[in-house]
Image (spheres, rainbow, N blue to C red):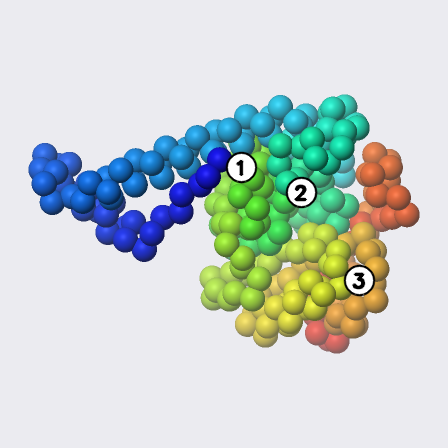
Amino acid sequence: MLTIRPYPCMSFCSNLLRTKLRNSNYNQIPLSCVFYMKTYRFSHLIKSETSRRLIKEITEVSRNHLTPEIDLHLITPNCPLWHSRGDQCPFPDPFWAFYWPGGQALTRFILDNSELFCGRTVVDVGCGCGASSIACQMVGASHVIANDIDTVAEEAVSLNAELNSVSQTTITSNLIGCHDSRWDIVLLGDMFYDTEFAETITKWVVSLHANGVTVFIGDPGRLPFEQHPLKSDLKMVAEYPLHEYCLKENNGLTSGFVWKYVLENSET
């Protein structure tokens, strides 16, 4: 489906439309703007509802992972897509449909250390299925932002949040490189999967730390992470043996680790 994106005048036109509707006078509203707003609103709504329906169809609700407290829509061996070719999936690259081991370890750490997250503003970057974000809500974080540039992931996070009776703020713009003085904690679950991308993340991690933000990283020992100079400035705060089911999905990985950026291990 072709998705129409809002123009810069969208906010102005929306306010104008509401004012004119109250006054029952349409003469000053450009017909093209009225048509556009109706088209965009319903196009966006249809796309969202279609995505949610398809997500439910291709996944199953699972607790077969390191955090059985959390229900998640996932593609598992019980789903037809698990045994199908990639081109048979209705979504491109459905990374959000898998619970990656670094994310599992990070989410387990959140649930086991609620005092670190309670009352804090947390940003979960590359949130995927949204498990870490959901865990933060469950342990009492004051505000949680689930961030993933995949708009389908946004719908998956919303569905998973509903399953667990929490609400989520989702953002699909790229937050890597951004700063906000209101952020207390940034989460990076299984984000060091590519050497070049790891460099981009590292520069941001250093900048976040310099601005007083705590950064927690979940990783199962992927090569780009293990060989990265950043490791010298990280302190391992948790290790979890991976669930048997996760071991089958991730051949060669045995544990999930959680690391905290502390700058040359100066923090105890």
Residue at 69%, 63% (x, y): give it. 197
Query: How far is mark 2 from mark 1, CA to CA?
Result: 15 Å
Q: Name the residue nearer the viewer: 205 or 241.
A: 205
Disc 1: CA contacts within 10 A as few (<14), some (14-19) or many (>=20)? many
Q: Name the residue nearer the viewer: 155 or 234.
A: 155
2 and 1 marks in contact (CB < 8 Å): no
N-terminal of the pair, mark 1 or mark 3, is 1
* Left or right of 8, for residue 266: right
Residue 61 pos. (x, y %): 67, 26
* Left or right of 259, for residue 253: right
Which amino acid lies under the numbered mark 1 shown in the image of this protein? Glu
Which element is circle 1 on? helix
Label 1 sits on residue? 155
**Total residue callouts:** 3
Label 3 sits on residue? 224
N-terminal of the pair, mark 2 or mark 1, is 2
Whether residue 45 can be seen here:
yes
Q: Is residue 267 above or below residue 171?
A: below
Q: Name the residue nearer the viewer: 222 or 110.
A: 222
Residue extending farthest to the right is: 252
* Left or right of 185, for residue 24: left
Q: Is residue 217 above or below residue 262?
A: above
